[in-house]
Amino acid sequence: MSIYAVILGLIVIVLLTVSLTRISKVKTKADYLVAGRSLPAFVLVFTLLSSWIGSGSLLGGAENAYRHGFAALWQGGGGWAGLVLIYFIAPRARKFAQYTIPDLLEARYNQTARVLGVIAVLFTYTAITSYQLIGGGDILHLVFPDTVSAVLGRWIIAGFVILFTAIAGMSSVAYMDVAIGLLTTVTMICALPVLIHQAGGWAQVHAALPATHFQVLGDFSLIQALELFLPTCLLMLGNQSMYQKFFSAKSEKDATRAVVGWVIGTVILETIIVAIALVGSVLFPTGDVHDHPREILAYTGMHGLNPAAMPGGMGSTVAGNLHATLQPYALGGSMLTLLGALLVGAIFAKIISTANNYLFSPSTNLVNDIFVRYMKPEASNKQILLVSRLMVVLLGLWALYQALHTDSVLKKTLYAYTIYSAALTPVILAAFYWKRATASAAVASIGTGTFVTVFWDSAFIHDHLPQIVSERDAIFPALIASLLCLLIVSLATKPPSAEQLKPFLEA
């Protein structure tokens, strides 16, 4: 059995152990959905970091970096900008202290806004979960190429994710994220300088790639850069998974402190991810990974940190570079292979963690916002926990169906981000910061944003709009339509009452 298989096996065992140790603490609805509102800032930092950096960054962002260089950071930069604004939102969100975003939508607007919010979250979060399953399946195929196809890998990962998520809810998810966040951060920081040296040093990396790989816009137009930036920024600002973690915090102060650590961790990790992918494009400019660049991080961990596995006769050159790198530290090839295995394992664990977070969140919506709210308000804690776990299974299967019918992780990422960005983020921010926003406007905004995004790629759009418009990503038309609805309908309808505004506009 290879060291890569051993590391993946150990990670699965550790994650399962963490989940099982937390299950005894889950006795009520609040325990399952928001960890009993007990998470300290330290745990919040890592669960926020782990839920945000998943396949969207590790596959989609890395693929972008392999092809376009540091301009790929426009995608991550949207999240960074959103994080700066979130610093001011976090204490208000914790003070509101409900369970889900649709809770917030009903309290600030009305029941229709709640239901439409549930629909938008389901579309978005199952799509995000689906490409985590693709990423995990890719890694299993790389580690077990003769026995596990990429498709079979998606089935296996779906089983892992459904099991881990169903066991203990938010408590399980949050404490698994601490171990995963630490593993990923340390491993990637250690791997990057070694890989740079293998490629001949930073000067050689720079010389081997087009100049555009190191420019702010790269080979993107400003519109293309903004199509990466805006969906990420707006998803970050309205992200239910994030708000749910703020609702889980011990206090408003813990929620605010966690954002500071989240900002630092996200900037560091996303920059390192792009840098590793860029160096990987120098080490592996051709071959299988050139045709499937979303696998570049895991492929680099398996081959770039294992000279014997380097194709095309590159092994001797890389081995010489590695020897020169490791000699001052008295490290051997086995230690380097271990580092490569840990990098693959860290990526695998990150993907599992993100899948857990984004599968758990919509299951919460179906339980709290549909089952308890409309079907059985008097449900006991035992019944709620049972239905919650059933929803995890059903939504996990839906995410798997999407994963089996998706080709491009990057395209799926932007689709998911755009639904949320256009449909929910405007009305969520308006709930806290615009007194004039009305219930009718929120309903129109959520419905329009969701509709435009989902149907933007339809044949009707392509047949009836000019090509220069129809070929653009949905973010601009969907966001503009949503904002116009929010603004125009709010100004045309009766303002909300002071009592309705009170929980949202007080600092």
Image (cartoon, rainbow, N blue to C red):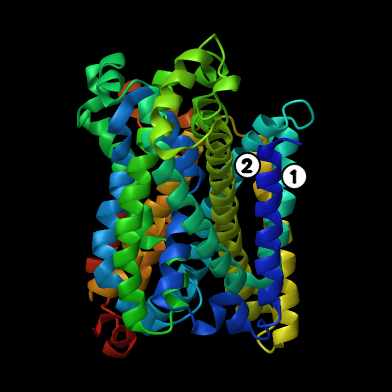
Mark 1 element type:
helix
Q: Quadrant of the N terminus?
A: top right
Residue 266 vertical placement versus 216 (above, below): below
The answer for how far apart the CA atoms under marks 2 and 1 are is 9 Å
Q: At which x and y percent is residue 456? A: 44, 37
Q: Quadrant of residue 226?
A: top left
Mark 1 nearby-residue class (10 Å; few <14, some 14–19, many ≥20)? some
Q: At which x and y percent is residue 75? A: 33, 41
Q: Identify which amino acid the numbered label 1 is placed on.
A: Ile
Q: State left or right for residue 439 relative to residue 507.
A: right
Disc 2 + disc 1, Cβ < 8 Å: yes
Q: Is residue 162 visible?
A: yes
Q: At which x and y percent is residue 258? A: 35, 70
Q: At which x and y percent is residue 298? A: 54, 34
Q: Quadrant of residue 97?
A: bottom left
Residue carrying label 1? 156
Q: Identify which amino acid the numbered label 2 is placed on.
A: Gly
Residue furthest right as drawn: 147
| 297, 69: nearer the viewer | 297
Residue 256 vertical placement versus 148 (above, below): below
Q: Quadrant of the C terminus?
A: bottom left
Residue carrying label 2? 136
Q: Residue at x 69, y 43 (%)?
A: 401
Q: Residue at x 65, y 48 (%)?
A: 399
Mark 2 element type:
helix
Q: Residue at x 63, y 82 (%)?
A: 29
Q: Quadrant of residue 490?
A: bottom left
| 320, 186: nearer the viewer | 320
